[in-house]
Amino acid sequence: MGDLNGDGYPDIAVANRGMTSYICFNDGKLHFKCNPLRNTPSPASILIADMDKDGKNDVIFPCRDNCQSRVFFNRDLAGEGRPWGPANASIRAIAVADLDGDGHPDIAACPEGLGCFVYMISADLNGDGHPDLIVGYVNAPGVIYFNDGTGRNFVAHRFGDGKGAIYGMASGDLNGDGRLDLVAARSDAPSFILFNRGSD
C-alpha cells in the first residue's frame, strides 16, 4: 500500500497468483479504479516502495512460479517493467530496505528453493541503525537475520515454537519502551507477539 499517483491517498497493489496482478487507485473515498500490471502472471506477494529515489513510489513484483520478476517504475506503471533477479524465479517473499547503507533501497528475496515458503519483512530490531530481515517459515521457527550493515553478513536468531505457518508479520513499538516489537500471524497455530527486551 502506498500513494502511486501523488494525490495523497494510499493506493493498493494486489498480487494474484495464477492470474494478472493489479494496482488500484484510491479516490480518497475508498472507491478504487484497478489497472492490470503487465507480465505479472504469478506472484505470492507484492510491494510498493520508491526504488529509484525520485520521490515517487514504484511497484515491486516478485515471480512465484518460474517467471521473471519486475520493478514497475512510477513513470511507466502501464509498461513492461524492468526485470530483476533470475529469469525463472520462484520467490515467495520479499522485503525492501537499504541493507548495505549506500542510500539506495535493496530487494531481499526469499526463493522457495532455499526453504522460504511464506513471509518476510525488514526492521531494525536491535537498534543499531541497520535494517534486519525477519523471515517466516512453515512448521519451523521464524528467523531474525541481524544485519552487520554490509547487507552481506547476517547473524541468525530463531524465534517461535516452529508450529504452523507464519503468513504475516509486522513490527512496531507496542509497549512504548523505544524498541521495535514483532507480531506474527500464523495458520494452524496461535499467532503471537514478541516483545523486544534489547540486549538484557
Image (tube, rainbow, N blue to C red):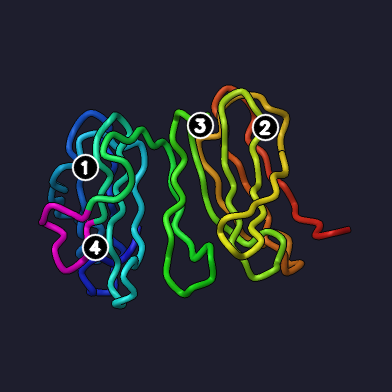
At mark 4, the secondary structure is: loop
| Magenta segment | 72-82
Q: On residue 171, which mark appears?
A: none
Amino acid found under the numbered disc labelled 3: Leu
Q: Are marks 1 and 4 in contact (CB under 8 Å)?
A: no
Nearest the camera: 5 or 31? 5
Question: What x and y, as percent, mark residue 140?
Answer: 64, 27
Q: Which numbered disc, 3 or 2, marks the residue closer to the eye? A: 3
Judge depth for marks 3 and 1 and give the one in front: 3
Q: Position of residue 136 (x, y in %)?
A: 57, 37
Residue at image mark 4: 29
- Give coordinates of residue 182: x percent, y percent: 65, 50
Give, as a three-letter code, the residue at label 1. Answer: Ser
From the image, state whether disc 1 or disc 4 is nearer to you: 1
Q: Looking at the image, how many numbered discs can be counted on the residues?
A: 4
Q: Which mark is residue 141?
A: 2
As measured in the structure, the alpha-carbon distance from the residue carrying label 2 to the one carrying label 4 is 41 Å
Q: Is residue 58 left or right of residue 176?
A: left
Q: Are marks 2 and 4 in contact (CB under 8 Å)?
A: no
Q: Earlier in the sequence, mark 2 or mark 4?
A: 4
Q: For the residue labelled by badge 1, is the local secondary structure a helix, a strand or a loop?
A: loop
Which mark sits nearer the N-terminus, 4 or 3?
4
Between the C-alphas of marks 4 and 3, the distance is 42 Å
CB under 8 Å between discs 2 and 1: no
Distance (Cα) linking label 2 and label 1: 30 Å
Instruction: Identify the residue at horizontal 42%, vertical 65% (top origin).
Output: 105
Tag on residue 114?
3
Residue kind at label 2, given as amino acid type? Pro
Residue found 34% across the figure and 58% down from its top: 48
**Pick the front one: 5 or 99:** 99
Quarter of the image where the C terminus is located? bottom right
